Image: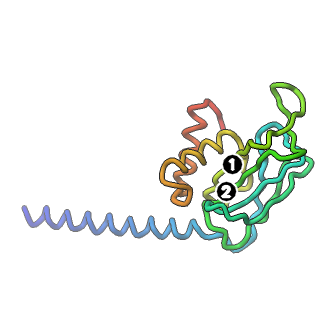
Amino acid sequence: MLCIKRLGIVCLAVGLVACNENDENKVAQSNMMPMQPQTLVVQPSLGQVFNGSVALSTTKGQLIQSLKLDREGQVKFTLPEGLAVPFMLKICGSEGVTYFDEALDKVVDLPKEFCLRAIVGETTLNTVAISVLSDSVVRYFEENGGLEAARAIDIKMRYDDFANKLGISK
């Protein structure tokens, strides 16, 4: 009987190690960019923003690319091959940057000291909104282990958790 229990424990341990090996491989693969260029549409969610730019950077703050918003208040990044995830998106107020404030029903200046960010954990997304919600997720990871440690599944779970708490449906 003791021998059967030992054999069962050994089989369980081998199975768990094998599962862990699979998980690590999937995580490593998820940090790689697909071979074809991926286009990512980004829209700040402040009401429509005018004359602004969105910066794409690494989680360590290294600027990769910055693009001006188009007439629809969007930018379309072609993600560079080999871009590691997670990566960051950011829009900040500056001279001449305005947005449509829905509460005031008019266009107002976006304050210079105001920035919103988003952390993106996967390259298969087609669109990303930069909002107070996305900035809250960034702040969460900054305070809990750092941006570099954030995994795609953790980022998605945090977005979903915050959205549910705020009553926001996706």
Residue lying at the far right of the rendered structure: 71
Question: In this figure, which residue is indicated by the disc labeled 2?
Answer: 88
Is residue 1 or residue 6 the one in the foreground?
6
Residue lying at the far left of the rendered structure: 1
Pinpoint residue 121: horizontal percent, then vertical percent.
Answer: 61, 57
* Amino acid under disc 1: Arg
The structure residue drawn at horizontal position 87% and vertical position 34%, both measured from the top left corner, is 108
49 left or right of 169 in image: right
**Screen quadrant of the C terminus:** top right
Is residue 132 or residue 72 the one in the foreground?
132
How many residues crowd around disc 2 within 10 Å: few (fewer than 14), some, or many (20 or more)? Answer: many
The structure residue drawn at horizontal position 92% and vertical position 48%, both measured from the top left corner, is 71
Question: In this figure, which residue is indicated by the disc labeled 1?
Answer: 117
How many residues crowd around disc 1 within 10 Å: few (fewer than 14), some, or many (20 or more)? Answer: many
Q: Is residue 66 above or below residue 164?
A: below
Q: Is residue 81 above or below residue 122?
A: below
The structure residue drawn at horizontal position 77% and vertical position 64%, both measured from the top left corner, is 65
Secondary structure at badge 1 equals strand
Is residue 56 or residue 156 the one in the foreground?
56
Secondary structure at badge 2 equals strand
Pinpoint residue 69: horizontal percent, then vertical percent.
Answer: 86, 52
Q: Is residue 33 above or below residue 126?
A: below
Is residue 122 or residue 102 the one in the foreground?
102
Pinpoint residue 38: horizontal percent, then vertical percent.
Answer: 74, 65
Badge 2 vs badge 1, beta-carbon distance below 8 Å: yes
Say which label, 2 or 1, has the lower sequence index. 2
Q: Quadrant of residue 167?
A: top right
Pinpoint residue 66: horizontal percent, then vertical percent.
Answer: 80, 60
* Amino acid under disc 2: Met
> Rounded to the nearest whole Å, what is the CA distance between mark 2 and mark 1?
7 Å
33 left or right of 44 in image: left
